[in-house]
């Protein structure tokens, strides 16, 4: 009884100390608690364990940079003429299409928007090789993006058919005799009309030997999966030019995507908060509202820093043990732990340039290149891993940063809300209308826009990943040293044309296949 009394009447201060200790440790312990659940969102623990800046010394100096600091005047200058022109267009009087096609060709495309875009170009080329009638490609629902948007939801199908009408026959849907050939039909059993094992980067001869007989026997052939199923090499020049004609001329977004993209570009060029002042006429007292506002320049930054990219890179992004555990669990669930990078240390990966740039690092890159805090920046990205906490440093460096949500109302965005492909289409459109495009790391969006802007001779900064990885590993580097190394390391990475090498993508390197030297 006496022991119980002593237990019940412990000093109040000791109880307060225990409670205080629990309060202090609660935010630290909670992330680990959440991370123990495989279905917990990686962003959950970031609410409690916001990653600190990893390059505080550089960041402090970058934030102190002045708006006009003697940067080279050609920073915003367009690319000089490099002596190459698009030349994929067909002849004035193209030969007529064969009177009879060999049958209908269906393709089922997986991946995100830009992977599907390249697949569409390849599908047209394969249909030409086979003398087949192409059915508008079917876009699979990607397990990551979860977007069921169809070809017609994204691309202007009538424009597509009209541009290609002299080269191949295209139909929006199969005739009634073949209406049975659906995605569901091929999902239930092995079908003689489905080609399932098309090799990656197959040759034209492979299609003639393996797909043409199916077409001739059945009147239809369905290829699934189809992404990356046509070689970039050893193809007739007219097939190569046809692929570029699809990519750069036939594939345009639906009108509502273009309209929203135009609105965003206009608001970036002519910010409403910076409208020209009204000029008062001293004699009449009237005001002139017709003063022409000078358009402003802007940069589009594609921040490819989603959960998939972060996990697959196997890099350390400063979120501590909870973040590492969450990403490791995600790698195990999605790829069964089979990720090549996971066998290397973070330092090894960074020194080789194999880690995607974080929002903080892309901000430091832009600041070192000479973009100041008055730069208008448009952030093109899917959901950023870590949310606003991860982006805050980039926003601090570039307070005039915008995105789809900040520039367009919810009513304007209603047709694209929750649809990853349409959201990416808007970003692609704005990226093609920007003065400068920068991608935080290589990927399908990076490759597609680099190729498209090369085709149009537009400035595109390609981050020197190995150089940046080594610079960011040097914790003693000064801002002056960092800035000099960045500028020197990106002199020849601002859109200069690079000729395609064997096995490289024609969509990233359109010259010389689809461009001619003047």
Image: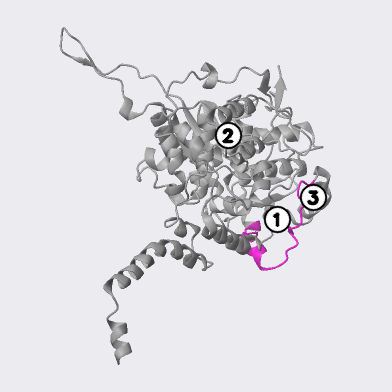
Asked whether the viewer can see residue 369, the reply is yes
Seen in the image, is 264 located left or right of residue 194?
left
Q: Nearer the viewer, residue 256 or 271?
A: 271
Q: Position of residue 289 (x, y in %)?
A: 26, 19
The answer to which image quadrant residue 453 occupies is top right
On residue 477, the disc is: 2
- Label 2: element kind: loop
> Disc 2 versus disc 1: distance between alpha carbons?
28 Å
Of tags 2 and 3, the one toward the viewer is 2
Of the 4 image quadrants, the one containing the C terminus is: top right
Residue 179 shown in magenta: yes
Q: Residues within 10 Å of mark 2 (few under 14, many from 20)?
A: some
| Residue at the left extreme of this rendering | 284
Of the 4 image quadrants, the one containing the N terminus is: bottom left
Q: Position of residue 454 (x, y in %)?
A: 63, 28
Q: Earlier in the sequence, mark 1 or mark 3?
A: 3
On residue 343, the disc is: 1
* Residue where numbered disc 3 is placed: 212
Residue 406 shown in magenta: no
Say above or below: 308 vs 161. Answer: below
Say above or below: 490 vs 409. Answer: above
Q: Nearer the viewer, residue 2 or 154?
A: 2
Asked whether the viewer can see residue 432, the reply is no
- Identify the magenta region: 178-202
> Disc 1 versus disc 3: distance between alpha carbons?
44 Å
| Residue at the top extreme of this rendering | 283
- Label 3: element kind: helix
Of tags 2 and 1, the one toward the viewer is 2
Q: Earlier in the sequence, mark 2 or mark 1?
A: 1
On residue 327, the disc is: none
């Amino acid at each position: 009884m006496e022991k119980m009394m002593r237990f019940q009447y412990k000093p109040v201060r000791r109880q307060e100390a225990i409670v205080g200790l629990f309060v202090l440790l609660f935010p630290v312990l909670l992330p680990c608690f959440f991370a123990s659940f495989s279905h917990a969102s990686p962003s959950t623990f970031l609410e409690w364990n916001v990653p600190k800046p990893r390059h505080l010394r550089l960041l402090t100096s970058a934030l102190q940079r002045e708006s006009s600091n003697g940067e080279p005047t050609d920073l915003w200058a367009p690319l000089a003429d490099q002596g190459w022109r698009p030349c994929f267009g067909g002849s004035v009087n193209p030969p007529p299409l064969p009177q009879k096609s060999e049958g209908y060709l269906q393709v089922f495309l997986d991946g995100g928007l830009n992977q599907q875009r390249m697949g569409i170009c390849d599908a047209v080329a394969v249909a030409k090789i086979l003398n087949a009638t192409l059915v508008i490609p079917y876009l699979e629902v990607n397990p990551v993006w979860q977007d069921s948007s169809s070809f017609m939801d994204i691309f202007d199908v009538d424009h597509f058919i009209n541009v290609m009408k002299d080269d191949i026959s295209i139909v929006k849907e199969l005739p009634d005799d073949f209406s049975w050939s659906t995605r569901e039909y091929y999902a239930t059993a092995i079908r003689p009309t489905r080609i399932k094992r098309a090799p990656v980067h197959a040759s034209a001869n492979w299609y003639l030997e393996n797909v043409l007989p199916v077409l001739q026997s059945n009147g239809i052939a369905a290829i699934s999966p189809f992404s990356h199923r046509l070689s970039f090499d050893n193809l007739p020049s007219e097939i190569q030019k046809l692929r570029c004609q699809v990519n750069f001329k036939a594939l345009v977004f639906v009108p509502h995507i273009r309209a929203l993209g135009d609105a965003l570009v206009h608001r970036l060029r002519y910010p409403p908060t910076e409208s020209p002042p009204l000029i008062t006429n001293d004699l009449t007292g009237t005001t002139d509202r017709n003063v022409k506002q000078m358009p402003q320049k802007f940069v589009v930054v594609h921040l490819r820093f989603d959960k998939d990219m972060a996990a697959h890179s196997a890099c350390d992004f400063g979120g501590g043990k909870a973040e590492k555990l969450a990403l490791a669990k995600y790698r195990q669930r999605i790829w069964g732990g089979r990720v090549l990078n996971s066998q290397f240390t973070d330092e090894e990966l960074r020194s080789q340039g194999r880690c995607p740039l974080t929002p903080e690092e892309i901000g430091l890159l832009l600041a070192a290149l000479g973009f100041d805090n008055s730069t208008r920046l448009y952030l093109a990205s899917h959901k950023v891993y870590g949310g606003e906490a991860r982006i805050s440093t980039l926003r601090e460096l570039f307070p005039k940063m915008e995105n789809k949500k900040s520039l367009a109302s919810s009513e304007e965005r209603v047709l694209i809300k929750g649809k990853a492909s349409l959201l990416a289409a808007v970003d692609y459109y704005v990226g093609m209308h920007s003065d400068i495009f920068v991608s935080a790391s290589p990927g399908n969006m990076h490759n597609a826009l680099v190729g498209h802007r090369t085709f149009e001779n537009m400035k595109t900064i390609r981050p020197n990943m190995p150089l940046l990885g080594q610079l960011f590993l040097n914790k003693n580097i000064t801002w002056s040293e960092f800035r000099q190394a960045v500028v020197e390391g990106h002199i020849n990475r601002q859109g200069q044309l690079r000729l395609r090498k064997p096995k490289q993508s024609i969509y990233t390197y359109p010259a010389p296949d689809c461009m001619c030297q003047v």
